[in-house]
Image (cartoon, rainbow, N blue to C red):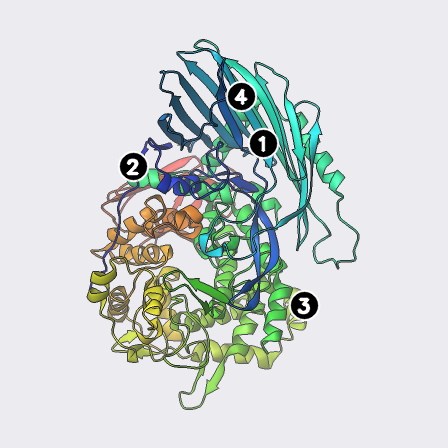
Amino acid sequence: MARTRRTARTPRTATGWTWTYTSYAPEREQLVEALCTLGNGRFATRGSAPECPAGPVHYPGTYLAGCYDRRTSLVAGREVENEDLVNLPNWTLLRYRRLPVDGPPGDWLTPDSEELRHYEVRLDLRGGVLTRHLLFEDGHGRGLRVVHTRLVHMGDAGLAAQRTVFHAYGWSGTVEVQSVLDGAVTNAGIERYRNLEGRHLTGHRAGFAPGGVAWLTCRTTDPGTRLAPAVRTVTRPARPAERSATNTGTVQTYRLPVGPHRSASVVKTLALHSAPDRPAAAPATAPLAASPDTVLDAALDAVTRAPAFPGLLAGHHAAWRRLWERGDLRVPGEAGRILRLHLFHLLQTLSPHTAELDVGVPARGLHGEAYRGHVFWDELFVLPYLDLHFPEVARSLLLYRHRRLPAAREAAREAGQTGAMYPWQSASSGREETQQLHLNPRSGRWLPDHSRLQRHVGSAIAYNVWRYARTTGDLDFLYGPGAETLLEIARFWAGATRYDPALRRYRIQGVVGPDEYHDAYPDATAPGIDDNAYTNVTAAWVLARGLDLLDRLPAARRAELCELLALDATAIEHWEDVSRRLHVPFHQGVVSQFEGYGELADLDWPGYEERYGDIRRLDRILEAEGDSVNRYQASKQADTLMLGYLFRPEHLSGLFDRLGYRLDDETWRATVAYYLRRTSHGSTLSSLVHGWILARQQGADAWRHCEEALLADVADIQGGTTGEGIHLGAMAGTVDLVERGITGLEAGSEGLRIAPVPLAEIPRFTFTVGFRSHRGIRLRVLPGRLAVRVPASPPGALTVVLPGERRFTVEPGEERWFRL
């Protein structure tokens, strides 16, 4: 039965390079703030109204990649630790009001003022600039137009700026402006987290420096990071400021003359500097890595040297131009506009600046506080794009995982296992950060959270290592940190299995699959399910790749790793055996999501849709009714079908064949159809995966799922989640759906494989990729035709492999057309 889907479009207009909201609607303001976030890969600032502090409608936030803080909260009578991405001091706050010649000052003007007559928010994707236009008019016809222009500098990752221009209509007088640097902020952006401890900044000091500069220093509590935002405020015409400061912030007040032919402006320029209290992994007694004054001096120096706003804007535009040259995807029509927005947010979260940092892929970007800014498995959907366009960024994200290999080894030891057991949710240290309790907003109950049993995250990391190396040819990484990471994950899987004599196969028990709904069997006293097909098949793949890698390694490196990981001939024989005899359950002629899935009850899908409408979060609905989704054949998102996302049909069939199972095209198509009818799509990744698989199969419903993936954030189809932070995996995945899904693009040792499938709704598109030593390869896909252009460059000819193993070469400086 088909699921009911809500695909209402968000009220906005757009052109190819702009995203515009033409009216003010308080109920959607946090959605606008998230989608209009500006960032540079190091930090990001939500697209919030400068006039407004945090409240029910507005939520300003600035987040620094990798800046986490751990606090303890009392939840349902238990002490619970959470490590959160920290909301930093608000540098954007700017209050203003009219000062009449006679009488008291007017109210501070905000988008919520009754005098608001016009409101427009425009995001320029080409240049990475956010502009807000407001027009206020009082009862006497006196108008004040306000234009805010904001950037977070893509060239200099420590700078941001905001220019505000005031125009008066029908009156002359004075505008009072307060430039505020507010350090009294908390993490309060997620309603269901608000009973948790949200105070992450401490040790505040604030003051002023020459040149209109206000500064603030503070630090997070644990782990300690010193922060020093410094803001330079410059007005035109120049006016002296009245200044006041508290420990947690500063206020600079200006009175600016305005009139019909006399505008005024205020420019706030931010320099954001930070430093860890101590070197990574150092004990608490170790010397401080940087003193507060050292970090502050760096910020003050940077803000003093920063160019004026026109110079900042020019440098920022130039940096974005270089990014788009490497990463743009051109698709006509509405789909293309949304894809460009998705790509814009991906590049803001993970830019070339990210390659200089020790950070992972935050599932909700740097756009809000959902999931506490944690790193899940979303790099599985993000790295394919980065591998092809920004391999240096992809490499740094994989190194984030390698640096946390000691924590993963320790987690495995604590669980009585060997190898490396990576956490489902990671943050600063690499320890497991998954919450132990979660709140069901429908019932108001705090419930045990067993999602940490999603051990398949390790397979995703190994898969990313292997695919990165195949795409880039970076053998230094593969044979170095990549090999250590992949082999330790393989070692974990080899030890996590249990041999079942009755089945004569190995089993993996007590886990949770990507579905996430099923965390136990009905009425079971212990969490976890057995033999999740996705977990077992990907574990077998990791073991097989580990064996391949051991064969490929130079002899000295192989000997070194075998000694380090205690891999002898017996262990390697065990890997081989497990990789060929892991159990995969079937029922009714389809692959079972896990052992016993086919014995669960069928859900009354039409009945629940009629009663509740949107049943994406079916787990919450059933729990509020006193029931459990564990009793039903109902999945939150793609689980078994994730295998079709990772592996081409011939590769998947080969994997099953290695395991001793037959998975022909008929069985796989039946499996796809079976789970399509039993999935509520409670995750934005679900529609992406289903759309990918159906597009490759040229299924009738492919576009319906692809479109939902495209609209997931821009239309906020999950009812309020986008305002808490964009879904980075789904955004990157839609771009990858076009670049690799529709084209069948696959990088391999034999060349660039391309096997396009037609998707009528996206009949033509153009993009550039890198492959091995080649850069700037341009692909143009048209109905029935494909063009490949290789720029004139030293690497030589590119081998292209088309369906039917047809091999062609494209010489440097040549463009070749192929009929499909």
Q: Position of residue 640 (x, y in %)?
A: 35, 68
Q: Amino acid at mark 3?
A: Glu
Sooner in the amino-acid sequence: mark 3 or mark 4:
4
Between 176 and 770, which is closer to the camera in this rendering? Answer: 176
Mark nearest the camera among 3 and 4 is: 4
Q: Which mark is residue 176?
A: 4
Mark 1 vs mark 2: in front:
1
Q: Residue at x 40, y 87 (%)?
A: 503
| Residue picked out by circle 3 | 560
- The Cα–Cα distance between marks 1 and 2, rounded to whole angstroms, is 43 Å
Secondary structure under the numbered disc 1 in the rendered image: strand
Q: Mark 1 or 3, which is nearer the eye?
A: 1
Residue for badge 2:
332
In the rendered view, would you say 213 is above or below 647?
Answer: above
In the rendered structure, find residue 180 and report the number of the disc placed on it.
Answer: 1
Return the residue nearer the eye: 531 or 151.
Answer: 151
469 or 116, nearer to the observer:
116
Badge 3 element: helix
Question: Mark 1–mark 4 contact, CB under 8 Å?
Answer: no
Residue at the image point whose x is 42% and y is 33% from the top: 125
Asked whether, in this view, residue 233 is left or right of residue 108, the answer is: right
Residue type, label 1: Val
Q: Label 4, secondary structure: give it.
A: strand
Q: Secondary structure at mark 2?
A: loop
